[in-house]
Amino acid sequence: KKGDVLIQINDEEIVEQLQKQKHNQKLNEDNEFRQRKLLEKDAISQEEYDNALNRLNTTFADVQLLEAQLSKTRIRAPSEGIIGLRYVSEGAYLSPNTPIATLYNNTPAKIEFAIPSRYSTSVAAGKDIYFKIEGDTLRYQGKVYAVEPRIDQDTRTLKLRAIADNKNGRLLPGLFVELEL
């Protein structure tokens, strides 16, 4: 599901630092409150109160920074889908360029295809398509949702994209389809 944790990096140090800063924040909140009461009674200088307030604000900023760092230790699913094969194992060291797995969103299925340029004037978004996949007798239906606004100079074809319902999950990325438009 969207937002599910896919992978988590070791975050023990950040969690402990965050706990420490939260204790400091509570202490600095109490100290700022006491200093404010003393300032109202002219028992301390404005500078002493400002120092207490600065310590509180700095600690608050440190807590926010650690919370942001902690959130980066979890990689969450950007969308709903199915996870493909894993490329790493638990305990493996990762770099920012290390592929972990592939997340596929197959519902609805997107079909990309090309037609000869001579038919370019007879297609538009909203047109129905019908197709079959290899090894399946079912006839699927979809709808064109995008048309490339230029002809490919190398192949003299026009690229189109269609979308089709895939509730049964039989339409997988990379399948070859026999298409009728």
Image (cartoon, helix red, strand yellow):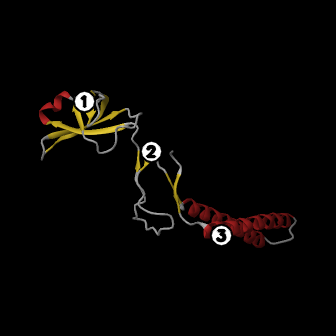
Residue 41 at x, y percent in the picture: 88, 65
Q: Quadrant of residue 156?
A: top left
In percent of width and height, residue 81 lies at 44, 44
Q: Which mark is residue 48?
A: none
Placement of 111 over or under 24, stated as above or below: above
Quadrant containing the C terminus is top left
**Which residue is painted at 58% across and 62% down in the image?**
70
What number is the disc on residue 81?
2
Callout 2 amino acid:
Gly
Q: Position of residue 39 (x, y in %)?
A: 83, 66
The secondary structure type at the circle numbered 1 is loop
Q: Residue at x 59, y 66 (%)?
A: 11
Whichever of labels 2 and 1 marks the residue nearer the N terminus, that label is 2
Question: What amino acid does circle 3 point to?
Answer: Gln
Residue, disc 3: 17
Task: Report helix, strand or loop for mark 2.
Answer: loop
Residue 32 horizontal side relative to residue 60, left or right = right
x, y percentage for residue 131? 26, 31
